[in-house]
Image (cartoon, rainbow, N blue to C red):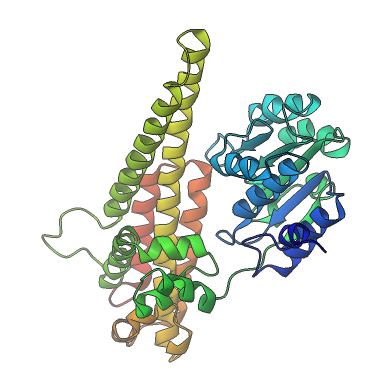
Amino acid sequence: MTAATDVRSHLPGLENHPHARMVLGGALVSGRPSHAYLLHGPPGTGKAAAARTFAAELLAEGDPDPDDVRRRVAAGTHPDLTWVRPTGAHVMRVEDVEVPVVAAASRTPFEARRRVFVLERADTMNDEVANRLLKTLEEPASFVHLLLLTDAIGRVLETVVSRCQVVRFGPLSPQRIAAELIEEGVPASRAEACSRLALGNARRARMLSSDEGAALRADAEQLVLDALAGEPEPGDGDEPWRKLLDRAEQRREAVEEAAAVEGERRLELEPKGRERRALERQLEDAAKREGRRARTEVLELGLDLAGAAFRDLACAAEGASEAVLGTDRVAELERAAAGRDARRLRDAVERCDETRQSLELNVTEELALSALTFRLRGLVGAGG
């Protein structure tokens, strides 16, 4: 085996994913990659990074300057790589695949031997989208390769799963994630707690270890403390759930602003005219979508953290503090859980999860969070 082949069979980032390393690395070594792969596993396990690395190797094959290909793929500027993110907050639309994938897959590559299409969140495809994509999945041109990504393979339509080679990404261990955080300078106690709370999601653990993540966690815990008290304390002002909304809105604004700046940079390279105006509208719409998605992610994470806090309280109430996820809060949890009904605390976890899932149905966020607060106070409040 040559040095180049050895590198290709051990794709960077797959050290902790033996199945993915075997399937994707083996495909590169054999020179016979499948026309469609479905990369699945918990969020934050490196599926998107693996897809980009794999795509780079597919496009670099036969190129006189493979390192340049890899750099352009990493920067998202290679013309034969198409990366699709659903434009709906919780659903992929037909227009997301009609022209960018289905139509484009019928055209020969611009410069490489292949064309690669990466579709994020394959679980958000409905029947209509899947039907538009099926022919491309079943009988693509010989130069076409599709990489579908999902955090929830159980939600991907069977008609899609059956036409792909499945690639499994397992959850990362808390120890592994904590070690990486510590290497990045995160204090050990915080790194351990964040890695456990992240449930195998390295990206989430990294976010939780940041100042922004710590503030979000504090907001979620305040919502829990408010529920345990039964009623908001006099003079507290706004309900605690409003802090979650405010933080989500701040995140939306920051992401949208960053996307707008990047859009301006891209527009500087475009000559004035109709195509530039069309691109400008596309970039504006994309920035808004990214902002909305970031807002939803913050709210969902906040509710997950509130649910985790109730779970930890239930563990502490039952004398199982060794099972607590927030290991940096054990003493506080034990005090707060004293005399509490563990069953009610577990029910509170379910209420938080139900509210998080309801956000996918485009319910009014204010009403959903307000209703959750009311239910939690009645369920676990003082005397409950």
Is 365 left, or right, of 162 in this rendering? left
Q: How many marks are shown on the rendered structure? A: 0
Picture coordinates of residue 267, whole percent (x, y): 44, 22
Q: Residue furthest bottom?
A: 319
The residue at 36%/83% (across/down) is 340
Front-most of 263 and 291? 263
Picture coordinates of residue 272, whole percent (x, y): 45, 10
Residue 102: image quadrant is: top right
The residue at 45%/54% (across/down) is 300
Residue 214: image quadrant is: bottom left
In this view, 271 is above or below 349: above
Picture coordinates of residue 126, whole percent (x, y): 69, 39
Is 324 left, or right, of 57 in this rendering? left
Front-most of 148 and 232? 148
The residue at 46%/89% (across/down) is 322
Q: Quick one: quadrant of the C terminus?
A: bottom left
Q: Quick one: quadrant of the N terminus?
A: bottom right
Can you see residue 125?
A: no
Q: Residue furthest top?
A: 273
Picture coordinates of residue 119, whole percent (x, y): 66, 41
Is 169 left, or right, of 243 in this rendering? right
The residue at 33%/41% (across/down) is 254
Can you see residue 357?
A: yes
In this view, 229 is above or below 62: below
Residue 375: image quadrant is: bottom left
Q: Residue furthest left?
A: 235
